[in-house]
Image: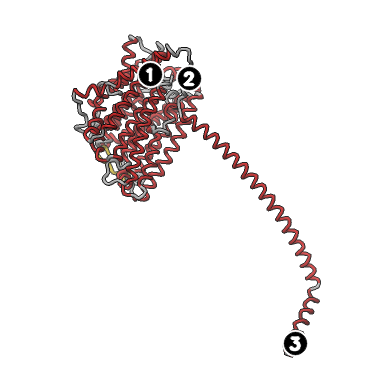
Amino acid sequence: MITLLLLAALLWPLCVAGSTVWQAYRTPAASRDYFSLLWISASWPALLLAFSGEVQWTIEAWMLGGYWELNALSRPWLAFTALLWSLAAVHARGYFAAEQRKARAGDRVIQRRCQRLALLWPLTLLGNVLLIVAQDIASFYLGFALMTFAAYVLVVHSGSDEARLGARAYLILAVIGEGLILGGLLWVAGTSETLTLKGVREGIAAADHGAMMALLLWLGFGVKAGVIGLHVWLPLAHPVAPAPASAVLSGAMIKAGLLGWINVLPLGGEELSSGLTLLGHVMLVAGLAAAFGAALYGVWQRHPKAVLAYSSISQMGMLTAMVAMGLAAPDVWPLLLPGVVFFAGHHALAKGALFLGTSVSEHMPRWQQPLLFALIALPGVSLTGALAAGMLSKWGVKSALYEMHHEHLIMLLTWAAIGTSALISVCVWRQWQQRHSGGGNAFQWGAWLAALVAALVTPIWLPLPAGSVVIPPAAEWLSLSWPFPVGVMVVVMAVLICTGLLRRVVIQAPPAGDLWWLYSVFSVKGLHVIEALARACERVKMASVSFSLAFERTLMGQLKKGLFAEAWMRHHGSGLMMAFAVIAALLLMWEGLR
């Protein structure tokens, strides 16, 4: 039965994609339902599979040999991923209802947009599911690459200049990341002669250049996980992507980078090399820098989804710091891993609900606005650790760090939660400023409410190993919840200062994408340098060609003179031979007289 569910989880998205192609050729445009119930159901078999139990599959005929597994890590990961994809698909049916009406009315541009999104959405889902269950290198990389490149359409959907810029940034960083991942995996596989992810972990731990292998993989997966410096696609892609696409990008797909780290890095290994330990400290610093830097930059953004993108970078920075402890302090990793999985699951649903909530505020239902915006803010409040599943997930991480006496990291993560609170406050404020009534759809707000509830009660439905969820003692509730009101007060004070004392000062919001624009400047300068070098090389080439031609002409002239000498020698050859014979005879006579 479980094997049938696995086949359904992998084949059903292909069937859905195939039905989309069939519909494009066989169904009249006026009758097409791009986001039908069939399309919505693409992720349902994967969701059922996640709750079916732990199992292993070995498929010798699959590529280099398939090894797939549902275990204590992949089951909860598949559960929150498939649930978020399901809710985002339901939301998409309502979100794209207006576009579908235009497509049925004959708008060919909208038809192409809906067609490509309906086709590549289930393929992106398929890649996401495959990389979660795969434990062999080939299957894992196939799923990761399929998810990465198919998701391009989720970003570029609207076709605007901003969407093309965001999609270009996403694709450029994606290609860089895929190259780093492929290079790292091939290096380890060739050195260790392994085809499994477990072998990759063991190979990195034992290899002389294990730190360099791990660095490649950390940076490669870090593109998806939003590592500082490689994060620039997130704030450019999210504001232009449709809300359901943003939900799966930030909730599910960004976690693929985190899962990649857990699968390939020797976290918690014994007797790690000094290079791997150093890499752990670098990851820790990079994670904390992202946690604080993204919060400081994100609060100035005007678009709600740009603010949420920086919130994702900040939260992933915290998770990066936790993963770093698996290399920097391996003893803490067995205690920390369940909390990291719980944290990731809660963040996925909470961030998904926040992104879906941006479309709800743009098309508000006829509810009381204070109630509506309180619900919109609720998953963000949980993210700060102030209530519900958020408090439990933060305590799951902090209790492990407390037990191994890492109080300084706990303090830094607590301060970073103030940044999360500030970002959520700014996001809700921006949504309030940009709210619009009407145009809503029951599929939209229904899926959003379901995601909100799922985020708040994550430990109830997420199939975590026994003992993963620990209720914090009452004495710790204040230490877990105080960052939320502090972050809100910081934002309120900043708004009062800007609207009061500094109301005559024009403050320009920094552009979303931050380092992207710096990279663009350096890239343009670099291209100019390359062009100048190319022109210089062309001049050298032309000079060398001219010199070669001149040398050739001179040489040919000398050869022609040699040809004249040849003709003379042929004409006088008999006389020369007689003279040579006489000279030879005289020499012989002279030699004989001696």
The residue tagged 3 is 590
Residue 325, position in %: x, y? 29, 37
Disc on the earlier residue, 1 or 2: 1
Nearer to us: label 3 or label 2: 2
Who is closer to the viewer here, 148 or 113? 148
Name the secondary structure under disc 2. Answer: loop
Which of the 4 image quadrants contains residue 577?
Answer: bottom right
Residue 528, position in %: x, y? 58, 36
Q: State which quarter of the image contains the C terminus.
A: bottom right
Residue 299 at least partly seen: yes
The residue tagged 1 is 426
The residue depicted at 46 percent of the width and 23 percent of the height is 510
Three-letter residue code for mark 3: Trp
Residue 303, position in %: x, y? 43, 20
Disc on the earlier residue, 3 or 2: 2
The residue depicted at 19 percent of the width and 32 percent of the height is 467
The residue tagged 2 is 508
State the CA–CA distance, disc 3 to disc 2. Answer: 109 Å
Q: How many marks on residues?
A: 3
Relative to 507, residue 174 above or below = below
